Amino acid sequence: MKKILVAATLTSILITPNLYAIEIYKDDRNTVTIGGFIDARVINTQGQTEIVNGASRINFDFSRELNDEWTALALLEWGVNPVGSSDIIYNNRFESIQDEFLYNRLGYVGLAHEKYGQLTLGKQWGAWYDVVYSTNYSLVWDGNAAGVYTYNKDDGAVNGTGRGDKLLQYRNTFGDFSIATQVQLKNDNFYTCDIDAISQSACEDLWNSGNTAAQKVEFNSTYGAALTYSMTNKIKLTAGVNRGEFNIAYGDGQNKSVVDLIYGAGITFGKISSRGLYVAANINKNKNHDTDNLGRLIKDAIGVETFVSYRFDNDFRPFVAYNVFNAGTDYVIQPNFNADPNDVFKRQFAVAGLHYLFDEDTIVYIEARKDFSDFTSSNKQQQASMEQSEDDGIAFGFNYTL
């Protein structure tokens, strides 16, 4: 039993903080639990009001006792879209734009030991998420400045900072310190074009024809590490780094080797599920790590996320959050034939909300977002496209955790 509990504890770190599960099978060696949540909401933004999915998901967590206090573990998680597809573009990839009812979110297998730690392989939360997850508790408009959901608000799979693909990851705890290290072993090729609404195949055709608006990108392995220090039972400090490298070949014959780098730190006071005050903040510096709202690579940026909430004895939990992702001017990597060197990219917004917790697993909520972003450009059509996905909004919904 002790070994199973150790494995379950380590495994929960890999999924998300504040995740609950129900045991559905158990014998003398094997344990299977089911977890996840269903979230549906009414949202008004970008001039539309619609019922949408809120990152609903279901997962199956497996563990098996082995010899010498080792435990084998595995997890499979799928996103679930219980309300159908939606055309609204949100400030974060909390609402999948997939048409499928089920789509892959996580999947990994590994070994765990109370002394020697845990080693896992597959699609899993990156080490970088350990640094910044504590500000990610708005249910609708969670942060998009911490470098997790990269490449225009995707799930962070490409560079391993979010739900990273093809990760080999090691975790362990030593007293008040916890570590996570990883390598993302891959070699991906894809094509990008400085043209709006173009398919991957059409972009590849432009590349093959030598069109200067096309680029071929080879994205190689990435590496990451994070350190967590539990200073007290309420104060937690985090720090980490993630690095990758890719090569860009341009249609005009130019080539460029680019380092994808992000590093930063965070601080947390309290626990989001406990009564009383909860405060979290993090800051990062990143280079060639993310894209603007048109998909253009950003050379340098600074991201800051903050979150403050208070859970009262009557189980109402109001909160406020502020996020800014500032790339300044002249932020697009060159050569890029679809960029004005005077373009400004500053994603900035505040969120205020109220959660009512019937219990830890059942929440009714209302949240509102106010945008303060600056996407100034001499190309007004591009500026309008940049601004479209950063609109004000208000939403209310229901979250049912398994």
Image (cartoon, rainbow, N blue to C red):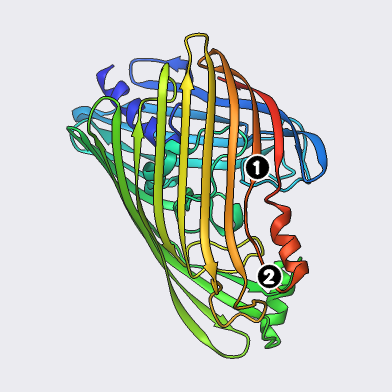
Measured from the top left, where is residue 234 in percent x and y?
30, 26
Considering only vertical position in the picture, is 90 above or below 16? below
Residue 28 horizontal side relative to residue 354, left or right: left
Q: Is residue 357 above or below residue 152?
A: above
Q: Tell me: 121 left or right of 307.
A: left
CA–CA distance in space, label 2 to label 1: 21 Å
Query: Mark 1 or mark 2, which is nearer the start of the sequence?
Result: 1
Q: Quadrant of the C terminus?
A: top right
Neighbourhood count class around disc 1 (C-alpha, 10 Å): few under 14, some 14–19, many 20 upward: some
- Report the amino acid beneath label 1: Lys
In the image, residue 204 lies at what x, y percent? 68, 76
Q: Nearer the viewer, residue 287 or 372?
A: 372
Residue at x 34%, y 55% (from the top left corner): 241
Vertical side of 37 occupied by 207: above or below = below
Regarding residue 19, the answer to whether it shows in the image is: no
Left or right: 116, with 212 as reference point: left
Quickly name the residue at label 1.
Answer: 370
